Image (cartoon, rainbow, N blue to C red):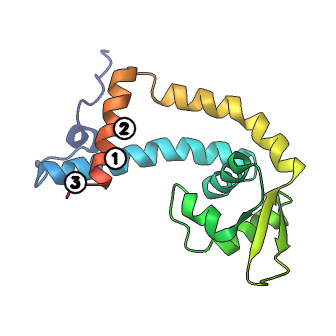
Amino acid sequence: MAKASPPSNLATELGKRKPFSSLRQETYLNLVRTHEHLASQFARFFRQHALSDAQYNALRILRGEAQPMQLCQIAERMVSTQTDISRLVHRLHTGGWVHRRLCQEDRRVVWVSLTQKAQDQLQQMDRPLERLHEAQFAELTDRELATLNRLLFKARKPEA
């Protein structure tokens, strides 16, 4: 029995009988489908380390800064918008990933820093995450990746 060829477009992949109503609709749905596929692989990886993708993102930001940060500073740098950064940091603190310290001058300000546990875990995760990124985009050349990045940025930031 001959092996079926993989789908070559989103409509075929979804088993859609009628065409999409517009190219823009198809593009949006293709982005959503791609995001779900790629993100699910990372979600599984992070679950193995008792983290969510948002928690990992916050830890990565703290490691990159290499000094305590305020909650609002972490929230500003998150890849995905976090509406409740306080709750996210609370879960990280409860899990032993971060230290929290109230500012003496302004009790509303909370300073957050990584624990040694977080630093060690992030270091252990670096190479496997790098391999996952490589595997997910192995079919694309560097030039295609640069073009994709430019187009995705342009879609988010249309010129005036």
Mark 1 and mark 2 in contact (Cβ < 8 Å)?
yes
Q: Find disc 3 in the rendering and name its residue.
A: 159
Amino acid type indicated by mark 2: Asn
- Tell me which corner region of the image, top left, top right, bottom left or bottom right, holds residue 119: top right
- 58 shown above or below 38: below
* Residue hosting label 2: 149
Which quadrant does the C terminus fall into? bottom left
Circle 1 is placed at which residue position? 153
Question: Helix, strand or loop at disc 3?
Answer: loop
Mark 3 vs mark 2: give the one in front: 3
Left or right of 160: which side holds 39? right
* Residue at the (30%, 26%) spot, across then down: 6
Structural crowding at the residue carrying mark 2, measured as other residues with C-alpha within 10 Å and reported as few (<14), some (14–19) or many (≥20): few
Question: Dot 3, crowdedness within 10 Å: few (<14), some or many (≥20)?
Answer: few
Residue type for callout 1: Phe
Task: Say which amino acid is labelled 3.
Answer: Glu
**Of all residues shown, which one is farthest toward the right?**
116
Residue 141 lies, in percent from the top left, at 38, 20
Q: Residue at x 82, y 49 (%)?
A: 118
